[in-house]
Image: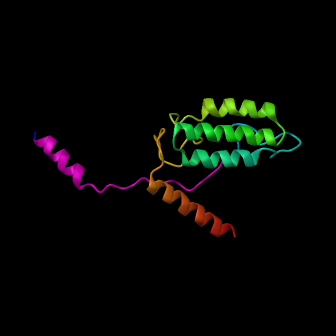
Amino acid sequence: MRVMLMLLVFAFTVPVNAEKINVFTSDGCSVFPDGTFKQAELWLACCTAHDYAYWQGGTKKGRLAADEQLQQCVVKVGEPQIAKLMLMGVRAGGSPYFPTSFRWGYGWSYPRFYKPLTTEEKRQIIALETNLSEISH
């Protein structure tokens, strides 16, 4: 009983800190080439946009949408077969349940899994976007 009481007191006296997202990073197309031999970065922009979505994380539907956008982007650069292969790869390897640097929601500490972004988390992302755009201009 005494231990339970101490745990309750401790739980209510420890300050609660909201999780903080790490600064956005991209490794390009992760373990996949960024382009062809002739055009070494042909679909790199597609992968960077995909990484941005994965960095943020969110719901299972959000991940599926990000993966489909990657596929559509690679089709637009003229590589429909590569796009299919990449879609299979990200669906198999990008799960938030794997402790990898390219998992869904990798901007947050592991484990994050699937969950909607809170208002505070969205605010953090927007603040980082604003800082990045100010630096690049």
Q: Please tell me which residue is depicted at 44% across the width and 57% down the height of the picture.
A: 120
Within the image, what quadrant is residue 83 found in? top right
- The residue nearer to you, when weighing 44 against 53, is 53
Point out residue 79 in the picture as x, y percentages from the top left corner. 82, 36
At which x and y percent is residue 102? 60, 41
| 50 falls in the magenta region | no
- Residue at x-position 57% and y-position 48%: 55
**Taking 27 as reference, is 58 left or right?**
left
Residue 12 visible in the picture:
yes
* Residue 30 in view (yes/no): no
The colour mode here is rainbow
Position of 47 relative to 93 (above/below): below
Vertical placement of residue 17 versus 60, above or below: below
Front in this rendered view, residue 127 or 27: 127
Q: Is residue 70 left or right of residue 20?
A: right
Quarter of the picture holding the C terminus: bottom right
Q: Which residues are magenta?
A: 2-26
Q: Quadrant of residue 80?
A: top right
x then y, percent, for residue 37: 86, 40
Task: Give the left or right position of residue 33, taking residue 21 as reference.
Answer: right
Of all residues shown, which one is farthest toward the right? 38
Which residue is pictured at 75% across the width and 46% down the height? 44
Residue 19 sits inside the magenta stretch: yes
Q: Quadrant of the N terminus?
A: top left
Q: Quadrant of residue 54?
A: top right
Question: Residue at 65% of width from left, 38% of height from top?
Answer: 67
How many numbered tags mark residues here?
0
x and y percentages locating residue 119 in the rendered image: 45, 55
